[in-house]
Image (cartoon, rainbow, N blue to C red):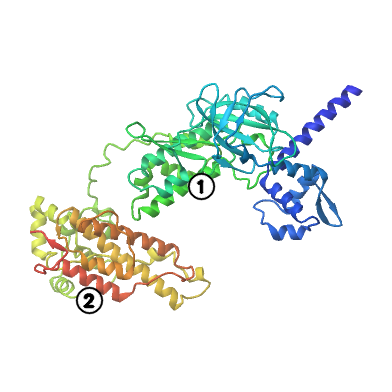
Amino acid sequence: MSTTLKIDNINQLLEENRAMVGVTSSPTCMYILHLIRSRQGITLNQINNEFTFRSGTAEDWLRHIIEVSLVEIKDSKYYLTQLGERKLALTDASLEELGGTEIPGIEDVPNKLPDSYKLDSKPLGAGATSVTFRAIQQSTGLPRTVKIFRPCITSYDHLESFKQKRATIPKEVAIPGFIGMGQFRVDLESHGEPVVLDCQVFDYENGDAKTLQEYVVNTDPAPYLSSDFFRFFVEHVGGALEAIERAGLQHGDLHARNILVIQREGREPAISFKVIDFAGGSSFSSLTFSGVNDLEMFKRHLIWCFSEVCRQRPGVSARELVGDKVERVIIGLLKRKYENFAELLDDFHKRARPIPTDYFQEPTPRPFEWLRVEMMPSLKDLYLLFEPDESVFKAISGSDNVIISGPRGCGKSHYLRALNFWPEIRELAEECEELKAKLDRIGYDFHRFFGVLFECRVGEFKNFSPEAVDGKKFTAETIQVLKHILVLKIINKTLSVLRESCESEVLIPSQNISALRTFIQERFPNMPLYGEPNAVEEMNQYARALVTKEKQAESTWNLPSKNRGLLLAEPDVEAFFRITSKRLSRSGSDSILHPCG
């Protein structure tokens, strides 16, 4: 009977110790304890007014604290118990004062530290649960990272459990090597009697490495924030977290300062990652500050890196920036597709479907499948099948503004599409005499007119609805915003055609782009330019930036208009096309782009 009681008492003590560790390792609980100590006799309403809880309520957190006898209630007010006072006194111990000292491996503690370490004068970092120092190991002379836990934060049994699970993680995983752990006794000025502290020792990573925070915010975008950066981020960081997860642990504190970016000049790969400050967070109680797991934090950091690079490189293709495999992972994370890192990495390494052998071959024309002239895949067919009424065609091509009206299927779209400027049509005409003869017959000559077909259909604007702004019809202010978006679409479509014409050398650039520069800067002040671009590259940068402006305007059209900036309208379209017509004049000395031939 007595033996059974003794075992029950041991189990009860262990359970109470786990609960105490859970409370003292929770930043939220510790904040509440410090708040109660500073204002003994505080009410529940006062606690709620002082602090906003990310998860749970004040009552939930206080219940855990009261269960371990750190706080008591008197007349609906909360007070620290004597035990609570002692626990807070221990956590007040300033471990930073250990800087510059040597922590010895001595026999008078339950779990001797295997070696002695000389700590640097300043810590690498300090958190709610521990302080980390760079140190020199006495027996080897090698630099190490020593993580010293604050008193009462953890138990040695928890650290021993971590050590056993950590031993199952392969050495090649992108986390610092584990050297060992132990306890040491030390006199602290901030505490009246010697204190036994737990610590862990890891390999020290090269001091030239940057934290992810420093690297992303302070690094010039080219060439390091590239598809390789994102690929290795998934492989190294995701691989480390998958190994930690497989060992039955979690990192528990994955923030942008706990991910190191290491540049290696003249070596392959040129960039690598390390996940640091991994001390086995899953050993602690489930009481946590935010409840955000490693997978969620990984997603946040990957998307943060992606958004930062997009901000630095407006208009660049997102898929080109991160690569197909990383794009697939980002989409999977946003859709909450993965339950764990093993599933994420399986999806990342999944082989792409092979490209069909006939993928790059021009499809066989099947004209009876074309429901609209816009769907014709071949420009050659577009013109060979075009049989215009000469009087109508002459009126359309010779006037600035023409209203075309007619029943469905009468050929309105064919006229408009045939008048569009296609940079590649000249090259096609050189290869096909029949096409050249047809273009000569209808008088297609972009030297004479320069048309850009902007297909504006109701379906393209279906996302803009009065109901989204709580009304039955758009206000005058909203109409201005939608008109701004429409003008941006027209300008961006035209700039896209001009860029294609330069690439195909139908138009030849000069070095005078002042008219376009003035147009852009007047409407979008402080538009950035990267490097020292020539005329075409400068135009390309403006084109990419304006596409970003268009997307931003589309995504925020129904938000309040504060700080929206200048809104474009009809006069801006007219001004833009005046610049465009100057570009294409045969003899204008201020032209930016000249026709070739």
Q: Observer-nearest residue: 165 or 441? A: 165
Q: Is residue 485 above or below residue 310?
A: below
Circle 1: element type: helix
User: Mark 2 packing: few (<14 Cα in 10 Å), some, or many (20+)?
Assistant: few
User: Residue 32, image x and y in percent?
Assistant: 72, 51
Q: Which mark is residue 5?
A: none
SS under mark 2 = loop
Residue 109 sits above or below residue 522 on the image: above
Q: Residue furthest right?
A: 1
Q: Quadrant of residue 460?
A: bottom left
Percent position (x, y) of residue 316?
33, 52
Percent from the top left, x then y, of residue 386?
Answer: 17, 62
Q: Quadrant of the N terminus?
A: top right
Measuring 48% from the left and 35% from the top, which residue is drawn there?
Answer: 274
The amino acid type of the residue labelled 2 equals Asn
Q: Which mark is residue 300?
A: 1
* Contact, mark 1 vs mark 2 (Cβ under 8 Å): no
Amino acid type at image mark 1: Arg
Q: Nearer the viewer, residue 246 or 186?
A: 186
Kindly identify which residue carries mark 2. Answer: 401
**Which mark is first along the chain, 2 or 1?**
1
Q: Is residue 202 left or right of residue 564?
A: right
Is 14 left or right of 364, judged from the image as shown?
right
Q: Residue at x 18, y 69 (%)?
A: 581
Q: Quarter-wise, where is residue 544 in the image?
A: bottom left
